[in-house]
Image (tube, coloured by chain):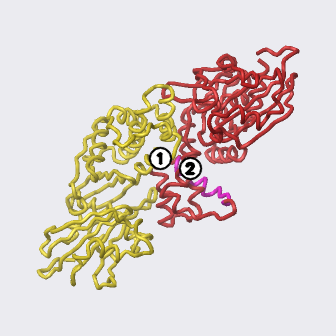
Chain colours: A red, B yellow
Amino acid sequence: MTQSENTPARIVVDWGSSNFRAYRFTSDGVLAEQKQAAAGILTVTDGAFEAALVREIGTWLVPGCEVFLSGMITSRNGWLETPYIEAPADLTALAAGARTTQSEGGITLHFLPGVAVRNPVPDVMRGEEIQVFGSVAADETALVVLPGTHSKWVQVEQGRIVGFRTFLSGEMFALLRTHSIIGRLIPPQGASAAPVNDAAFLAGVEQAMAPTSSGLLNDVFTARSGALLNAFALTDIAERLSGLIIGHELRSGLALAPTAASIRLVGEAALCQRYKLALAHLGVAADLGPAHATVEGFRRLNAL
Amino acid sequence: MTQSENTPARIVVDWGSSNFRAYRFTSDGVLAEQKQAAAGILTVTDGAFEAALVREIGTWLVPGCEVFLSGMITSRNGWLETPYIEAPADLTALAAGARTTQSEGGITLHFLPGVAVRNPVPDVMRGEEIQVFGSVAADETALVVLPGTHSKWVQVEQGRIVGFRTFLSGEMFALLRTHSIIGRLIPPQGASAAPVNDAAFLAGVEQAMAPTSSGLLNDVFTARSGALLNAFALTDIAERLSGLIIGHELRSGLALAPTAASIRLVGEAALCQRYKLALAHLGVAADLGPAHATVEGFRRLNAL
């Protein structure tokens, strides 16, 4: 994939379950245009992925252009399933693991692989790897944390992904808030967003980290029982629950790399700030990765 | 509540969120009749609890009888809210904490209190306490485990409830199976019940107990990633997930009382057998409590 003087325009697409994000680079590597839409693969029916691509970025798809795709679009439920490459994995291995095909419209499509690790427990990612490579220097060693629905804690050594763990934190919060007995006690928010309540959030983080914690299954129940016993207000439950879940993620994640020189938070800004706040409360320093890690990752990929 | 020769017939009702269970004792303390119905308090609308009681056991409600009620019927969402009594709590304190009222039909109703503990974390129970008192001798010391939607691990010292923790295990399994990305990979069962798969269940228990576990939030995700990487079959996911969740409950619960002389499992027979199997796999002995712990508890209460 070494660029020549005649390299055609490149388009990179980060196509996940919920979101579609595309970036157009000029032939000299400049980011020229971007597009974001709530057009994740779950919104595409009957496998009509090419139609969706044309709908979102049809004007970019000129003859000779190449499209690189990553994220859940390369999964079993996506357009073309790619294999996982095994950790340790670097950017060159990622590029080598791509599957290339032609669209019906004659555009060259490169589907990037996901990354897998098998020990000590099996884990997979699709899409986060390009963010990781966009967040570290070529030979850097770091613990990269991508908070979210399925938070990833990624161990990077000398620029390679050597291991990672996924935590179901964001999905767990949504499940408990929406469907559980704990959520039933949370007062309805009405039209306005819930006010940020750092004190309740940090109280949850502290409880999860405390030696007295009996694990997540007990701690989440106390978000209900504590309110019933007036240990805190009903309006604190949601933030406390969030702190308990993120606190357990931090407790497990920090144990993975107790001597990590640096923790880098990558992803949505407000959520990264939340994690940074919790980590600071625990006396752990963290820095924030680039605002557009995916773009940086693709830029490095393009430069290979 | 000392019984005299003229003690009227006593009726005890274990009325929870999902189930209604009633028992009629004769004036000389013999269990004469019982009734069970899927008529939990969540099925009762507009507070029509007396109508529901009459519908289920109207023929038992003769003049002079007394009805004792426990479970969620005594909660904020029930018929009459009773306060919690604080641990350490014995059966005498439970009886003393009851609130007595007359029904519109002139029947004497005694609503038993729940039990609360505030340290190190807040916790509550309503209904399980009568099962605990029905499962231990008057001066016994034991760790009583009541598996279920909200499993309780209850520390009993010399016949008193001195502390307890609730684990959201059963509800967590249902949430993850029904609503999460993990459940989406589980093959539909069809009309027949899923076959029991002890090997997959115990593999989950082992993983949760292992030093390499990164906690529940990571382990439950591996029930998906492991199947994607062919570490086990799609048909194993549900049992493995159950083992992971129960394994984390056991890990935390056993840490509460590492030197417990005995663990007593109380509740639904098949579920208690599942816990006994998992505990035996971990080399921990457990015995099974009485088949009708609620009845035994009320029998002891009646004898006060």
| Helix, strand or loop for the magenta stretch, by majority | helix
Residue drawn at x 14%, y 71% as measured from the top left? B29
CA gap between label 2 and label 1 equals 15 Å
Q: Position of residue A215 (x, y in %)?
A: 46, 46
Give the residue number, with chain letter if any, for mark 2: A173
Q: Is residue A204 magenta?
A: yes
The amino acid on which the numbered mark 1 sits, given as a three-letter code, is Thr
Residue A148: x %, y % from top left: 63, 42
Q: Is residue B50 above or below residue A290?
A: below
**Quarter of the image with the N terminus of chain B in it:** bottom left
The answer for which chain carries disc 1 is: B
Q: Which residue is mark 1?
A: B178
User: Are labels 2 and 1 on one chain?
Assistant: no
Residue at the (23%, 57%) spot, across then down: B135
Specify whether A216 is left or right of A153: left
Residues in magenta?
A194-208
Where, by quadrant of the figure, is residue A48 drawn?
top right
Question: Against B1, is A35 above or below?
Answer: above
